[in-house]
Image (cartoon, grey):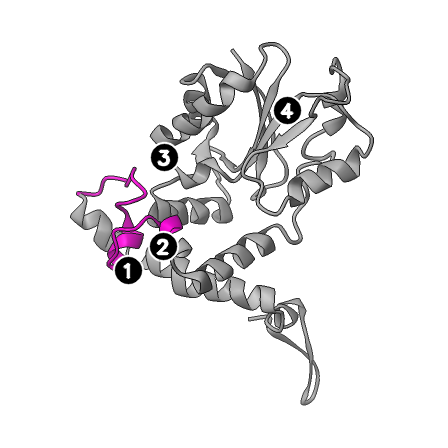
Amino acid sequence: MGVILETGPDEYRRTGLSDSLCSHQYIEFYRCVSSRITDGVLALPAYLKDAGYQNPSNGNDCAFQLKYNTKSHFFDFIKSNPKVAAEFHNNLSTYSQGRLSWTDPSIYDVTQLIQGMKIGEDEVVLVDVGGGQGHDISEFRRQLPNITGARAYFMHRIFHDWADEESRKILKNLTPAMKRGYSKLLIHEQVIPETRANWESTSLDLMMMAQLGGMERLAADWKSLLESVGLKITKIWTPQTGDESLVECELA
């Protein structure tokens, strides 16, 4: 299983996996996945049977609630359980380890945000909406340390937690702040291809459905969602298989 590597008779050495099993951050990650997220997925067949095999669209009524016998939304549940919350936040912090940053040129050329940009000391170049501890915006600052001027709103792994109705509410609170022909919305999430989808993307789709009534989306799903709130996709920047894409949007 790759936990240790045999190097000779009765001789072994550690691997990256065994190193991670000694790290508090990764221990919490594995505990969260095995005792919280996996349990919700295991309850999915029973939930779907009771629901007439209709996908959940309400985060307060999905497989997670069935498994844990609770009426609380997953996020409300972890708020009231500090130990679970700590595990979950370590899960999020380790998820990006070993993955390319969204600012990597192979994913998105951040220097294009400078083109035609308004410059001013009071302007803000990038707003990271729901950015947690700020590792995404820190990467942006590292790439462009001296940039100023208002241009873009960035959202990373926000919408896969929610079905379309809730996602529209989030977007409708953001679009009034955008300027037509100038402001951009950058969504950093999975864009699942219609065929030959990567196993990591599709397993995340099942996890989101089981835990939150959410989903990973196809390009057509993103187009439909964004157009319903007056936005248009200008380009989808797609990295290597299994990694998250960058969906660039403007006001229609």
Helix, strand or loop at mark 4: strand
Give the mark, 1 or 4, whose residue is nearer the N terminus: 1
Helix, strand or loop at mark 3: loop
Residue type at tag 2: Phe
Crowd class of label 2 (few under 14; some 14 to 19; many from 20; radius 10 Å): some
Q: CA distance from mark 3 to mark 2?
A: 19 Å
Whether residue 233 can be seen here: no
Whether residue 197 can be seen here: yes
Q: Residue furthest front?
A: 122
Crowd class of label 1 (few under 14; some 14 to 19; many from 20; radius 10 Å): some
The answer to whether residue 25 is left or right of residue 44 is right
> Which of the two discs, 2 and 1, sits closer to the camera?
2
> Which of the two discs, 4 and 2, sits closer to the camera?
2
Residue type at tag 4: Ala
Give the mark, 2 or 1, whose residue is nearer the N terminus: 1
Identify the mark at residue 68; answer none if there is no mark: 1
Q: Residue furthest right?
A: 146
Q: Quadrant of residue 144?
A: top right
Q: Is residue 46 above or below residue 51?
A: below
Residue at x 29% of width, y 39% of height: 58
The answer to whether residue 51 is left or right of residue 138 is left
Residue 79 percent location from the top left of the image: 41, 54
> Which of the two discs, 3 and 4, sits closer to the camera?
4
Which range of residues does the magenta coloring cover? 52-77
* Residue under label 3: 163
Do tag 2 and tag 1 residues touch (Cβ < 8 Å)?
yes
* Residue under label 2: 77
Q: Quadrant of the N terminus?
A: bottom right
Residue type at tag 1: Tyr
Magenta span includes 69: yes
Do tag 1 and tag 3 residues touch (Cβ < 8 Å)?
no
